[in-house]
Image (spheres, rainbow, N blue to C red):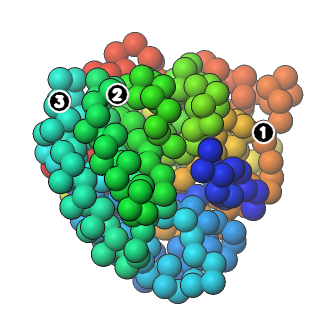
Amino acid sequence: MNYRAFGRLGWNVSEVGFGMWGIAGGEGGWTGSDDERGMQALQLAVNNGCNFFDTAWIYGRGHSERMLGRLLRNNPDNPPIVATKVPPKNREWPSRRGDKLEDIFPPDHIRTYVDKSLENLDRGSLQLLQFHVWEDDWAHDERWMRVVDDLKSEKLIDGIGISVNRWEPENVIRTLETGLIDSVQVIYNIFDQAPMDQLIPLCAQHQIAVIARVPFDEGSLTGTLTKQSIWPEGDWRNSYFVRENLHATVDRVEALKQDLPVGMTLAECALRFILSNPGITTVIPGMRALGNVEQNLECSSKGPLPPPTSCSVLRRTAGIERQRHGRNERRTIMFN
Ligand SMILES: NC(=O)c1ccc[n+]([C@@H]2O[C@H](COP(=O)([O-])OP(=O)(O)OC[C@H]3O[C@@H](n4cnc5c(N)ncnc54)[C@H](OP(=O)(O)O)[C@@H]3O)[C@@H](O)[C@H]2O)c1
């Protein structure tokens, strides 16, 4: 496993981390999770060098954090780095233009959820707390700055991050320019490369860590979906892969598959595409199957994809992105 410096906080984090949404199951999330299998997947990741785990209070309403707490207790000599998220008070993903900070992240709400997360994780402090939605209009609002400053001086958190809304990578730029944010979490994958326009270069300039989430586009970039794919009732993927998105996505995946280097799976290509970008600090695939954990962590040792001149899949990615026009209208309510 290769490690990269986590922005100005300087932690040595595994370049392949672990996304802990799916593993927790629960309302508004993924079906098909199983705690014992999930704990095995987490431990296997630790054994194979993964040390960065991304969770959130909303993932199973504390369940994902409690699983991570178990993992921490089971690995006292080699404790993984914890990144969690405070949910918006109105419980709506994403936030909307015009939302007021006092309705989404009032100071007492932030503190309440820091306490809940600490209890779930069974810890005295959090390494990274992230805002789970964001509006850049809040950039200069001193109320979030004050509470973050207090949490840091009380040593309840070491770092503060923002998880930007799906398909809105620029809805954070002014906030990053305040110099007060340590990390950004953003969707960056073969289909969603818009963060390279402004966000990732800006982060490099300011030493802000970049956590690349949803590397497989919620599963399409593993090559396993068809135009008939459907998930059990209650699985949020039914609301993401609605017919219009599913059909267009499967077509793009099929086109991409034609260009894969011999012997490389689409999932490997998707992860190594992200790892090829030095502007990314860590990528956090969701993975519950033990075989997926093994394969994903192995990608680190395989290194970047070959240069575009010799790799047709990289040339292909240039034209295969989701249409950027209308990106902001394609909003997904992830949880109620
Ligand atoms: N707003 C936010 O802040 C936000 C939103 C979404 C996600 N996230 C974070 O980002 C993380 C990653 O995103 P995600 O979990 O939604 O989606 P993802 O990582 O794009 O895709 C996960 C899916 O890929 C499958 N998979 C993983 N490795 C595979 C492999 N090698 N071969 C074939 N299939 C493979 C998983 O299957 P199995 O599970 O069966 O192994 C799962 O179905 C989340 O867990 C969460 O931590 C944050």
Give the Cα distance between marks 2 and 3.
13 Å
Residue found 41% across the figure and 76% down from its top: 123
Name the spot of residue 57 as percent of width and height, x first. Answer: 30, 61
Q: Is mark 2 within 8 Å of ligand 1?
A: no
Q: Which mark is residue 99?
A: 3
> Is 113 or 247 nearer to us in this picture?
113
Residue found 38% across the figure and 25% down from its top: 171
Name the spot of residue 89 as percent of width and height, x first. Answer: 16, 48
Mark yes or no: residue 277 visible.
yes
10 Å crowding of disc 3: few (<14), some (14-19), many (20+): few
Residue found 26% across the figure and 68% down from its top: 116
10 Å crowding of disc 2: few (<14), some (14-19), many (20+): some
Could you tell me the amino acid type at mark 3?
Asp
Could you tell me the amino acid type at mark 1?
Leu
> In the drawing, does residue 195 fall left or right of residue 139?
right
SS at badge 2: loop
3 vs 1, front mark: 3
Could you tell me the amino acid type at mark 2?
Ala
Q: Which mark is residue 139?
A: 2
Q: Against 190, is 151 above or below?
A: below
10 Å crowding of disc 1: few (<14), some (14-19), many (20+): many
Q: Which mark is residue 305?
A: 1
1 vs 2, front mark: 2
- Decide which of tag 3 and tag 1 comes sooner along the chain: 3
> Is 19 or 14 nearer to us in this picture?
14
Name the spot of residue 102 as percent of width and height, x first. Answer: 15, 38
- Which quadrant is the N terminus positioned in? bottom right
> Is 96 or 320 nearer to us in this picture?
96
SS at badge 1: loop
Give the Cα distance between marks 1 and 2.
36 Å
